[in-house]
Image: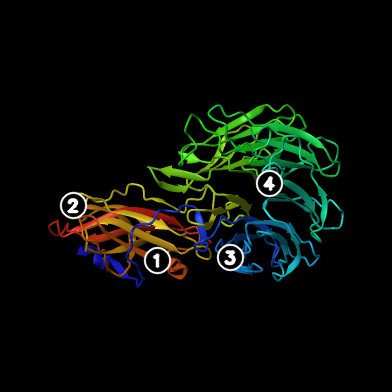
Amino acid sequence: MNSLAARTAPLALTFLACMPALSAQGVLAHWPGPQYDGPGDVAAAGDINGDSVCDLAYTQPDLLPAGIGHLIVRSGVDLSVLLDVAGLAPGDGFGSLVEALGDVDGDGRGDLVVVATAYVACISGANGAVLWQIPQANVVSLTGLADLDLDGARDWALGAVNTLLAAPGLVRIHSGRTGAALSTIAPPPNASRYFGFCVASAGDFDLDGNPDLLVGDPSGGNGNGSVSVHGISQPGVAGYFQGPQNPYGHFSWWFGASVATPGDVDGDAVPDLLVGSPGETFGPGNGYEGGPSGRARMISGASGLTLFDFTQFVNGNGFGFLVDTYPDLDGDGRPELLISAGIERIGCCHYFPGELRIHSSLTGALRYHGQRQGAQRVAAVRDLSGDGIPELLMAQTGPATTSLVLPFVSHYQGIPGCVPKVNSKGCIAWLDASGFSSLSMGDDLRLSTYGLIHASVGLFLFSQQSATLPFGGGTLCVGGAIRRSAQFNAGGTTDCAGAFALDIPKSTLAQLGGGVGSVLYVQAWYRDSGFAPPNNIGLSTGLAFTLFP
């Protein structure tokens, strides 16, 4: 390895030959679901284990007839599994939705409501036992409410679609302590079978001192979609908002498929609404086969006027499938607006998670854009990275995975001034990473490099200092005391098809780095016999990893 050998110390590390993986910057952990998983759900679970730290929950439903769904709760401290609760019977669809209610049985631990195909159950956070169970089919939405019946436990609402085309869906309020039905929400005129497709707390919309409920009906309002506001303590429709008519056909744009409120945005004392319209298209033929579709509107609760209008940045399908609020990022004292798209299409038939965006509720300005971080379900959970910003727990499909994403945190970046050497076949070796550079939690860091001379030998170089040193006809991007992995074969059978990867356990990462907050610099080296010595080497791009707790 030329003169570099005298300046390096061998480090025993395992490695796997592989094709390159897509980088996952900001993803602390991901937990794949079963092969036949449906879209699961996620929630900030509250304090499940009594350590005064909010934990996180997600579900993994299994759609096979004999499949068993699961509710999984992980520690908000180290992501270890606190609970793994299986459905009551194979094929019962357990885990399609989950909602945290806080402590409903008085034991000091948070409890959770979980939906199955034909029932809803409350699961004890203390031991996973079923606290109560009620029969109800076709539930598609849940939301937690205040303690309406004053029994010391939060209550909740469900929405269930109707299997009869001509009958409206069901929205009902339930006790958190017992599961008993407290009241049923009367649908407005022109409600469809999808009335209740989404439900959300509205705050005090009509200023009567009582809490209200937002209900979405993406086929209501004469087929254009609608959102209605209903009194809970005082029944009645306090507000009604109808979606735009589709000029390109007779199908609904699904206005009202998602709804949330950040409170009063325009200063008129009436809460305002963020409404998703994921089927809304921008021309004839859009919205099909992954074509662009979707919009979200911030609507004045008092006047019905559109305050902000959000459309997608990418070739996504279903932008606005999910809308929600996110804790204040810009210090204006108001929650932000979160909007997610379901799918992004690349080329004719390659589908990926769409985009996720966070906007200011006061100005509409973009605060965060997560490419390929779109998800069917998203929950803001406690800050794990120490930057003071809540993380995002996401349930994604294609493939079904639950991911823990750290907004605004890129745990690695390119090394400034690091220029890869073009090899003798005219290719560049790229260095990539997945996992996360945490010393205690989440996925282990995995390095991969590709574009190498096939069947060449190579290794990774590690240092706590960067460099831009001329070396072997290229640029050495790691300096100071350099450590190296064992050598391995890049494989491949054609020019530039060589690749290798390296899994780095957390214990090894701690040895390589300088502790939390330090930066670890990495570059791949490989043999290139197409050049004459001493330049018969190749050097990849370089990456700098910040080490997190």
Name the mark on residue 503. 1
**Is the Cβ of the residue at disc 4 closer than 8 Å to that at disc 2?**
no
Front-lying residue, 93 or 12:
93
**Is the Cβ of the residue at disc 1 closer than 8 Å to that at disc 4?**
no
Q: In this view, does 323 lie above or below 248?
A: below
Task: Tell me the SS state at disc 3.
Answer: loop
Frontmost of labels 2 and 3 is: 2
Q: How far apart are marks 1 and 4 (CA)?
A: 53 Å
* Residue 470 visible here: yes
Q: Where is residue 292 shown, x and y percent of the image?
A: 48, 36
State which tag comes first along the sequence, 2 or 3.
Answer: 3
- Say whether residue 133 is left or right of residue 326: right
Task: Tell me the SS state at disc 2.
Answer: loop
Task: Tell me the SS state at disc 1.
Answer: strand
Q: Quadrant of the N terminus?
A: bottom left
Among the 4 quarters of the image, the one containing residue 225: top right
Residue visible at 50% across and 43% down in the picture: 355
Frontmost of labels 4 and 2 is: 4
* Amino acid type, residue under disc 4 in the picture: Leu
